[in-house]
Amino acid sequence: MAIKRLTPTVRDLGFLRLWRDDIAEIAGFAGQIHDVKLNMEADDNELDDVQADLPKVGKRLRYFTLTATRLSGQVLKVRLTSHGCQVEATNPDLETRGIISDIEAVADRCRRVPRWLCPLSPAGGSNAAAAAVLIAVFGGIYSVVAGVSAYDHFALSGNHGVSWPASIISCILSTIITLSIVSMQFRARTLLFTGTNADAPTWWQEYRGHLGIAIISGAIFFVLGLLVHV
């Protein structure tokens, strides 16, 4: 008798930005599995067709789930939520593993946060989130200290907390790291839209908020540096 694995194979897809076309593509891949029945649900609504039914739910979704089943039980399950996305399969065969790879390819195309950064996100656990916050805080503090040292250099006061030019270089690097972590925290959630890819915003519409955060944070660090110096 062949051994049957009881623990599901779970793949973390990370934080994604998915439009109706992308969700329909994922559902289409799942529908290719031989002899399965698809059950789809979005925001407490049962769906028959992604393209036709999703626009009736609203402009954005809280969650979308897809379950592919046979008489023998569940074959594949896809969960897309604001807190993260997963695909799982119990004892997957070669066909199911191929479908999972196709779904992961869609996820890689629609990723908002790089997969290797997901453990630092709030959904990656309280310890990881706390570590990310500490890195951001200490990065900001170091930016202020290095900024003061750079100011002292230009003012020719001779009071160098960090030697020149390491002060300005480390200030720039730590500020970039801090802003990157803060930006990641804002992006660490999945967005599910019922519109199509044609409705996607332009680059400026999508990133103007991040640019605003970077400018404001830089201004705050600069003012704090001046206050500390005085």
Image (tube, rainbow, N blue to C red):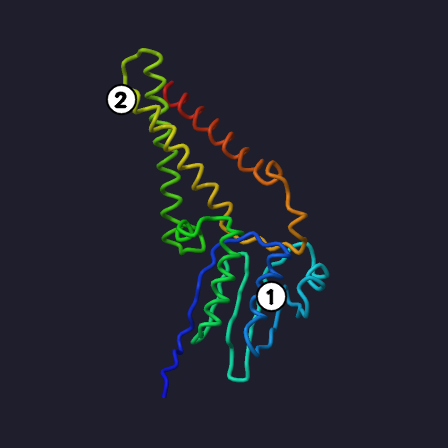
Where residue 1 sits in the image (x, y, percent)?
36, 88
Q: Is residue 96 left or right of residue 36?
A: left
Q: Are marks 1 and 2 in contact (CB under 8 Å)?
A: no
* Residue at position x 63%, y 40% in the image: 202
Where residue 218 sits in the image (x, y, percent)?
46, 29
* Residue at position x 43%, y 67% in the image: 10
Q: Residues within 10 Å of mark 2 (few under 14, many from 20)?
A: few
Q: Which quadrant of the figure has residue 48?
A: bottom right
* Residue at position x 53%, y 37% in the image: 210
Where residue 188 sits in the image (x, y, percent)?
49, 50
- Check residue 205 in the rendering and tell me which mark sits there, or answer none: none
Q: Is residue 63 left or right of residue 157?
A: right
Q: Which quadrant of the figure has residue 4?
A: bottom left
For the residue pair 31 and 17, the one nearer the viewer reads as 31
SS at mark 1 in the image: helix
What quarter of the picture does the C terminus occupy?
top left
SS at mark 2 in the image: loop
Amino acid residing under circle 1: Gly
Q: Nearer the viewer, mark 1 or mark 2?
A: 1
Where residue 37 sits in the image (x, y, percent)?
60, 77
Q: Is residue 96 left or right of residue 61?
A: left
Amino acid residing under circle 2: Ser
- Check residue 28 in the rendering and tell me which mark sits there, or answer none: 1
Q: Is residue 177 above or below residue 191?
A: above
Give the CA distance from mark 1 to mark 2: 59 Å
For the residue pair 118 and 151, the one nearer the viewer reads as 118
- Check residue 163 in the rendering and tell me which mark sits there, or answer none: 2
Residue situated furthest bottom in the rendering:
1
Q: Is residue 8 above or below residue 177?
A: below
